[in-house]
């Protein structure tokens, strides 16, 4: 039996909101160069879609982190399994994240990036679960605030599956095989 997934945010709504975020970033930076930092793997789909709607000189770099926790909640102890390729010193950095849940991972990462002396540092997150927050972290750009449910799609996974769904969904029922 396959997993049963319901749609929380449909594809068209996702695309529309991401284009609005891109337009907002374009307006805010007024032609200044922007350096997107994509946090792998979850943010990769969002970063690609977002980047196409930002119309200022743009570069992209990638970081991969593993956050230790009990499986459902991150601990804030973060291990970098891939660091950035390039220095961010003096750059207008926008960290692109798939979801801010407790905020622990981002709290750690933003402190780390701040130490590397960017010209400016902002956070753009596709999703936010405010009910779960245990830190002060808020996105400067937020796609959608969602209720406290475990979501998949648009880069977000369940055991590495479902990143390729073009919408945000909720697993309503677990089957005995992944598609
Ligand atoms: P935080 O440190 O904010 O609690 O955790 C952020 C990370 O937890 C996200 O980057 C993501 O990898 C994972 N995460 C949090 N909520 C969800 C969710 O609803 N679905 C999925 N697939 N991952 C989530």
Image: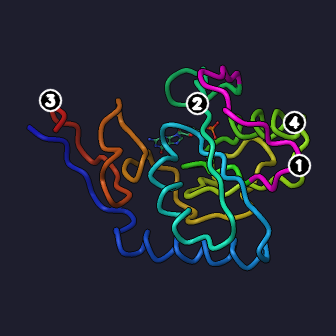
Mark 2 to mark 4: distance in Å?
17 Å
Image spot of residue 154 (x, y percent): 40, 53
* Residue 2 sits in quarter: top left
Report whether 75 appears left or right of 161: right
Magenta segment includes 178: no
Kindly state the secondary structure of the residue where label 2 is placed: strand
Q: Which residue is mark 4?
A: 116
In this view, 104 is above or below 5: above
Q: First in sequence: mark 4 or mark 1?
A: 1
In this view, 68 is above or below 161: above
Q: Are marks 2 and 1 in contact (CB under 8 Å)?
A: no
Q: Are marks 4 and 1 in contact (CB under 8 Å)?
A: no
Image spot of residue 104 (x, y percent): 71, 35
Kindly state the secondary structure of the residue where label 4 is placed: loop
Displayed-image quarter of ligand 1: top right
Q: Which residue is mark 2?
A: 64
Q: Are marks 2 and 4 in contact (CB under 8 Å)?
A: no
Mark 2 to mark 3: distance in Å?
30 Å
Q: Which residue is mark 1?
A: 90
Which span of residues is magenta-colored? 77-93
Mark 2 to mark 1: distance in Å?
22 Å
Kindly state the secondary structure of the residue where label 3 is placed: loop
The structure residue drawn at horizontal position 16% and vertical position 39%, both measured from the top left corner, is 179
């Amino acid at each position: 039996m396959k997993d049963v997934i319901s749609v929380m945010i449909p594809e068209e709504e996702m695309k529309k909101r991401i284009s609005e975020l891109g337009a907002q970033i374009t307006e805010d930076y007024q032609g200044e160069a922007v350096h997107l930092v994509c946090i792998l793997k979850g943010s990769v789909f969002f970063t690609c879609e977002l980047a196409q709607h930002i119309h200022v000189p743009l570069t992209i770099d990638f970081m991969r982190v593993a956050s230790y926790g009990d499986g459902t909640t991150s601990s804030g102890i973060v291990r970098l399994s891939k660091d950035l390729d390039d220095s961010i010193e003096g750059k207008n950095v926008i960290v692109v994240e798939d979801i801010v849940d407790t905020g622990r991972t981002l709290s750690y990462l933003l402190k780390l990036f701040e130490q590397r002396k960017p010209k400016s540092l902002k956070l753009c997150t596709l999703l936010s679960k405010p009910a779960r927050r245990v830190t002060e972290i808020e996105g400067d750009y937020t796609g959608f605030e969602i209720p406290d449910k475990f979501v998949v799609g648009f880069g977000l996974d369940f055991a590495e599956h479902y990143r390729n769904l073009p919408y945000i969904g909720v697993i309503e029922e677990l089957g005995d095989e992944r598609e």
